[in-house]
Amino acid sequence: MHVPGGRALIRLLELLGRRATPILAVSLFIGLALPDLARLARPLVAPAIVGLMVCNVMRLDLRAIAGAAASRPAAAAAMLAWIMVGAPLLAALVLAPRPLPPALKTAILLTASSPVLTAAPTFVMMMGLDGALAVFAVMASS
């Protein structure tokens, strides 16, 4: 099936895939420098994140995800311990001496105790780290 402009789109996506990390950094600075443009582009953020997640997860091998914890059990256990115990405990220790409203403290603790963002594997893969282990951590902590 021939799609008009299909090759150009593929080349653009390949370029974005190879340069994802610096493009993300530059886009953050552009958004800060040009708030009106950032406000205009706001409706595109959610579809862009979903698209990145879908593209990156499609690149993963389901066997690799299933074997991620088995091949690196110490790393998997450390990630889950940090996500499920370490982050909430650290947040509680940091918040305890602070004179903040109880509702704000509760909100921060709930955020620190919540599962890893489903977008985390996308950012992990953009940094060249183990995406399968990140997907395992998202699934296991959820």
Image: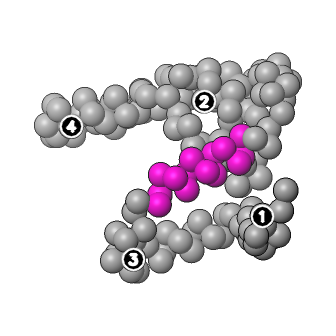
Residue 20 location, quadrant:
bottom right
Residue 7 location, quadrant:
bottom right
Q: Locate residue 16, reporting x and y percent.
A: 71, 67
Q: Distance between the residues labelled 3 and 1?
A: 30 Å
Q: Locate residue 107, reporting x and y percent.
A: 27, 33
Q: How far apart are marks 4 and 3 (CA)?
A: 31 Å
Secondary structure under the numbered disc 2 in the rendered image: helix
Compare residues 113 and 46 and report the one nearer the observer: 46
Q: Mark 4 points at which residue?
A: 104
Vertical position of residue 55 compared to residue 18: above or below: above
Q: Nearer the viewer, mark 2 or mark 1?
A: 1
Please tell me which residue is depicted at 59% across the width and 65% down the height of the picture: 24
- Residues drawn in magenta: 44-57
Q: How far apart are marks 4 and 2 (CA)?
A: 25 Å
Q: Locate residue 36, reporting x and y percent.
A: 33, 77
Q: Residue furthest front?
A: 1
Q: Assess whether mark 3 and mark 2 are in contact (beta carbons under 8 angstroms).
A: no
Q: Which amino acid does label 3 sit on?
A: Leu
Q: Which of marks 4 and 1 is in front?
A: 1
Q: Which of marks 4 and 3 is in front?
A: 3
Compare residues 117 and 78 and report the one nearer the observer: 117
Q: What residue type is labelled 2?
A: Val
Q: Mark 1 points at which residue?
A: 3
Which badge, 4 or 3, is on the more N-terminal residue? 3
Vertical position of residue 80 compared to residue 122: above or below: above
Which badge, 3 or 1, is on the more N-terminal residue? 1
Which badge, 4 or 1, is on the more N-terminal residue? 1
Which badge, 4 or 2, is on the more N-terminal residue? 4
